[in-house]
Amino acid sequence: MKIEIKSLIDGAREATGLTVIIDVFRAFSLECYLYNKGVKEIIPVGTVEEAFAYKEKNPDYILIGERHGKMCDGFNFGNSPSQTKDADLKGKIIIHTTSAGTKGVANAKNASAIIGGSIVNAKAIANYIKKKNPKTVTLVPMGLAGIEPTTEDELCAKYIKSLLEGNEMENIEEKCKELRFNGGEKFFNPNTQNIYPMDDFYMCTKPNIFDFVVEIHKNYTGFYTRVNS
């Protein structure tokens, strides 16, 4: 198995084989929490305009997303696991757009298959890939808005790679805690708590609390996701 790490939007465009689009803070961590709450389906879209187009045709769909971390105007929720944890979303269909993760999906046009990547289900991702046993795996840490590397996404990519190679990274829990001071500072800044709640940091940095994978598929209308346990 050939395993490559290719970062940011350019990495997504270059990705081949089974591709893992990684967005720890917060897109694909959030999607794990949403599926764990019982949502029916998540539709990842690259732009706010696409999100509203889906909503216009399907008024019952729920809009979740952000730009520059902030909830998009007219949306039901921001890109926040803590701000959606008490919402009754069981059986709902979610339209999801973010500055990095969902844009990575939209740009991974050469991938043979796509899954979402996060720390909260990293071992499940590695086990899934081992079962699929593809010739090529591309891990794509999306970073900040897909243009600037971030510590948390790079850490997640290296951790998944270590699991695939049978040489599991040591002290992943400690490394996740250290993100508070190296990538996660915004979650502890009083001036940005409304955009980046502190609880989001802790919820996104709990290694391996979910045992399923978020598969991303494409049909004639665009992308959709489903869970593979």
Image (cartoon, rainbow, N blue to C red):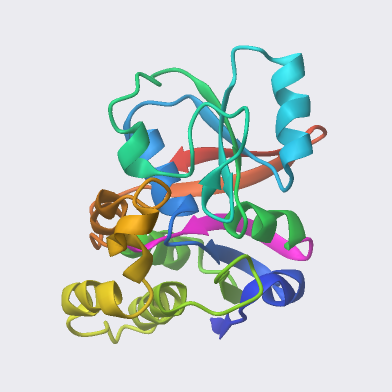
Position in image of residue 94 (x %, y %): 55, 29
Position in image of residue 11 (x %, y %): 68, 76
Q: Residue at x 37, y 65 (%)?
A: 186
How many labels, in total?
Answer: 0
Q: Residue at x 70, y 70 (%)?
A: 9
Residue 222 visible to an observer of this rendering: no
112 in magenta: yes
**Mostly what secondary structure, the magenta segment?**
strand
Q: Residue at x 26, y 54 (%)?
A: 198
Q: Residue furthest front?
A: 191
Task: Say whether residue 72 is left or right of residue 205.
Answer: right
Residue 32 picture quarter: top left
Task: Say whether residue 223 is left or right of residue 35.
Answer: right
Position in image of residue 61 (x %, y %): 59, 19
Task: Say whether residue 45 is left or right of residue 188.
Answer: right
Tell me the magenta residue range.
Answer: 109-119
Q: Nearer the viewer, residue 14 or 199?
A: 199
Q: Nearer the viewer, residue 210 or 3?
A: 210
Residue 43 visible to an observer of this rendering: yes
- Using the image, determine if residue 119 lies above or below residue 216: below
41 in magenta: no
Q: Name the image quarter holding the C terminus.
A: top left
Residue 19 picture quarter: bottom right
Q: Nearer the viewer, residue 185 or 225?
A: 185
- Using the image, determine if residue 53 lies above or below residue 13: above
Position in image of residue 43 (x %, y %): 62, 35
Q: Residue at x 34, y 63 (%)?
A: 119
Q: Residue furthest right?
A: 220
- Using the image, determine if residue 91 lies above or below residue 206: above
